[in-house]
Image (cartoon, grey):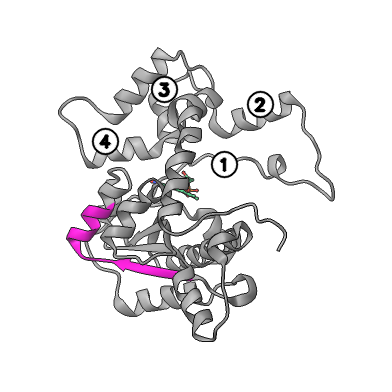
Amino acid sequence: MDLYDLMMKRRSVRSFEDRPVPEELLDELLDAAVNAPSGGNIQPLSIIVVEERAARAELAEMVGGQPWVANAPTSLIFCIDFHRVKRWASAFDVEFRGEESLLSFLIAYADLMCAAQSVVILAEARGLGSVYVGTILSSIEYAREFFAMPEHVLPMMVLSLGFPKSVPRDIPKLDRHAAVHSEKYAARSDDDVRDDFERKYGSIDEDVDRYLERAYVEAVERDRQVPRDDGSWVGDVKKRMQKLEVKSNAEFLFRVRYPQNLMVRFNRDLIKALDRAGFSFPLAKDE
Ligand SMILES: Cc1cc2nc3c(=O)[nH]c(=O)nc-3n(C[C@H](O)[C@H](O)[C@H](O)COP(=O)(O)O)c2cc1C
């Protein structure tokens, strides 16, 4: 398939067949990850391959009970790894202080996502499906301990992989024109911005179930994979939408799905987890 078509067809997959990713294929994916672009080509990256069933189940819990993480035959944990870089530097009596540099941290995170996305695309081309699981950021300490990560190693992203059992359709996306500017940033009017997102998600009050199929596929899929006796995830979401009288996509996203007070409150946990892993970004006095 043409690469453009493949990229336009790619969807996050959350339902996997119960068969392993062949070893040679996994090796290719990992080669692609390690061969990805890297700022300064320093490659401060480690990838933990998780395939044992018990560890997959634990990882699924760690990321907030996402069943597809347990069901996927392979998950890759992409970590910023300054531990290895520091050891290398110190072997040559050089100081590496990436754990104190927000710039080094951001470059390392960019490297990590370049590597992960290389895996996503190659996996797709080889007939696999994948899904990113970013909620590992809420369990950095748990993950560091469980996977025996030393100081200065941070789990930042999980990518779960396998042969797809089903692939979602109709995932809404912004129109290209809503996101692309020619030469200079072109401010859009409030109406334009509203229209861009209405076009993306469609109307919310037509049919809430159909809306959630498009806008909250994780909740729908979770109910499919682990039905609950005491209701459903989608049911809980709908109740919350009713209680908050949600009428727009923006309200749904920023009051129900990602309540903004929680997102800000989460800073504290994240900064603490980084600190415990040996990362902090002081405002250095002139040296
Ligand atoms: C940074 C990031 C974090 C994500 N975290 C999760 C996650 O925790 N669980 C999940 O099921 N999907 C997760 N996803 C996948 C998105 O939900 C998905 O990309 C989005 O719904 C668009 O669908 P598409 O990938 O099919 O285009 C994440 C994607 C990104 C880029």
Q: CA distance from mark 2 to mark 1?
A: 14 Å
Label 1 element class: loop
Q: Who comes first in sequence, dot 1 or dot 4?
A: 1
Considering the image in quadrants, where does the C terminus appear? Answer: bottom right
Residue 186, quarter of picture: top right
Q: Position of residue 26 (x, y in %)?
A: 36, 74
The front one of 203 and 262 is: 262
Please tell me whether residue 48 belongs to the stretch shown in magenta. Answer: yes
- To which residue does mark 2 refer? 194
Which one is closest to the eye, mark 3 or mark 4?
4
- To which residue does mark 1 refer? 173
- To which residue does mark 4 refer? 223
Highlighted range, magenta: 45-59
Q: Who comes first in sequence, dot 2 or dot 4?
A: 2
Please tell me whether residue 170 belongs to the stretch shown in magenta. Answer: no
Amino acid type of disc 2?
Answer: Arg
Q: Who comes first in sequence, dot 2 or dot 1?
A: 1
Which one is closest to the eye, mark 2 or mark 3?
2
Q: Who comes first in sequence, dot 2 or dot 3?
A: 2
Q: Are marks 2 and 1 in contact (CB under 8 Å)?
A: no
